Image (cartoon, helix red, strand yellow):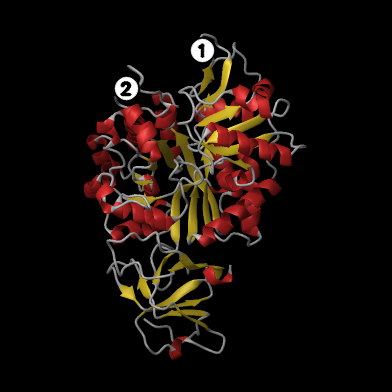
Amino acid sequence: MKDTHHEADIVLTNGTIYTLDDEDRFATTLAIQDDAIIYVGDDDDISSLTGPDTRVIDVDGHTVLPGFCDGHCHALMGGRLMNGCLLTGASSKQEYVKTIQAYAQNHPDASHVFGFGWIHSPFPSRGPSKETLDDILPDTPAYFLSIDYHSCWVNTKALDVAGITEQTADPDGGHIERCPDTREPWGCLREMPAIRMVTTRLPQPTKKDWKQALKTYMRKAARNGITSVFDAGVLNTDQWNAFHAAKEMDDDGELTIRLCESYVCDPSQGEKQIPDLLHARETVGDGTRYKIGVAKIFMDGAVEGHTGFLLEPYKDRENYRGNPVWNPDEYKHVAAALDKHAVQIHVHAIGGAAVREALDGLAYAAAQNGKRDARHTLAHLEIVSETDIQRFPQLGVIACFQPAWFYMDENYYDETIPLMGQARADRRYLIEDFIHAGAMVSFGSDWPWGTVSSTMNPLTAIGTAVTRTGPDDSAEQAYEPQQRMDLKRAIKCHCYGGAMQHFMEDAVGTLEPGKKADIVVLDHNIFEEPAARIDTAAVAMTIFNGTIVYRQDAT
């Protein structure tokens, strides 16, 4: 119904407004008063909604959607990495060297150098070497995280700071690559426990650094129509400064996203770390637009670095399936303890064996504590057996996918097929199988890392989920075409699915009176040609909590 008692602050008219409500309705008019939607419907006469101070915006028939929810990204870490040495624009060892040289020349007084974005294919299976970095940065500790964030390229100075030598044992859940025929460190560290051996010994970001990082992320989020975010972890550094920085920004009314932060669990600490997580939730985790209530767990790494935990061996490494980051029994007990305290669990699981062990732990938790609406989540799900897909709805576990990866990019040819073989390479990201099984699905980006296809743009994710092709590919080149999604369903996964994952479906995720005015307006109507790629569309306007935080025509 129309609210005739209060004039609206903003009215969007002449729109193709997809409400995502229970009736799956479209509307033409939407009105906002303060931070909430007060009317959604079809009305040529908007006089009863408007007053002298109402801002009426004709959206010219373009699509209007709920604000996008990113169900798995790294907002704070990503914002910080954008201020470091970015390697994402390069794709060869020579290009990386030039980029790092230029950065080093422009930052001669840096106490250390950090960067992000190299891909695996230009290097041997043991990764990039320390000698290459030593030639550029002989006296300054330096580390560069890979595009998937599961490997780290370091120089000799960084290894020295960390005390990593040929006598240093691999940490639990991590691996130090070694020189051929010796135990001398090669210059590449695999997985968080090994990476943290370096990063925790270097100067830590301050609250000021984290605030700047979050502001950087929020500007990008607004341009992409993202209004709600699950941050899948502040990694390889002190989490507390980041928690306090976000909480202070929330208290000061500076957040332009609804931010759900997670506490990254350390496999070496087991149940001992749970009191710290609960303390974070109680002291800094319950704000107006910011909360901490999720435990982030890595069950494996990434296929590209041979750290994904598979059900069958890698094609290029006989009898090697990878290893889990967590001891399975330890993980089960931690999962049960977290669940007992009503902590939501979010597990990184790439390979089929990692998915199975993650589900086993959540099943154990439910058996110990009783089944509840926990909405535990598994993210990425690159290779999952059909048997385990059926367990998601049975256990009430949410499947969080990153659809922007779902096409045959250069990684598919250079890494996926050589490491996994053609048959497994063509049975990945089985999103429609999850839908048909009855699983709840959400979409995320994993920004800024993932693959060469990594992007935070929800329109790219939705478009790729619908077509299973890259931006420049033809329909004939669709990757696993039987897994293509319907456009409406893909939108729901990126709006309502994310809201469900965050326990926010009563506030956001659909466009209905009474819900928060988190809204995205696109620059054309994506429903006019549903079979076409929609990522040619762009965000024209983002409204968060009733306030316009981005306009395309204002930049």
- Amino acid on which disc 2 is placed: Pro
Considering the image in quadrants, where does the N terminus appear?
bottom left
Residue 371: where, in percent of width, then height? 32, 42
Q: Residue at x 28, y 45 (%)?
A: 479
Q: Secondary structure at mark 2?
A: loop
Q: Residue at x 39, y 69 (%)?
A: 511
In this rendering, the answer to whether 295 lies above or below 2 is above
- The reply to whether residue 358 is visible in this rendering is no
Q: Residue furthest top?
A: 181
Toward which corner of the image does residue 187 lie, by quadrant?
Answer: top right
Considering the image in quadrants, where does the C terminus appear?
bottom right
Task: Decide if residue 35 is on the left or right side of residue 29.
Answer: right
Task: Decide if residue 160 is on the left or right side of residue 344.
Answer: right
Q: Residue at x 45, y 37 (%)?
A: 338
Which residue corresponds to mark 2?
A: 313
Residue 74: where, in percent of width, then height? 52, 45
Tell which tag, 1 or 2, sits nearer the viewer. 1
* Label 2 crowd (10 A; few <14 / some 14-19 / many >=20): some
In this rendering, the answer to whether 430 lies above or below 51 is above
- Amino acid on which disc 1 is placed: Pro
Task: Decide if residue 390 is on the left or right side of residue 208.
Answer: left
Q: Residue furthest right?
A: 109
- Residues 440 and 421: in front is 421
Residue 391: where, in percent of width, then height? 26, 39
Which residue corresponds to mark 1?
A: 180
In this rendering, the answer to whether 456 lies above or below 545 is above
- The reply to whether residue 175 is visible in this rendering is yes
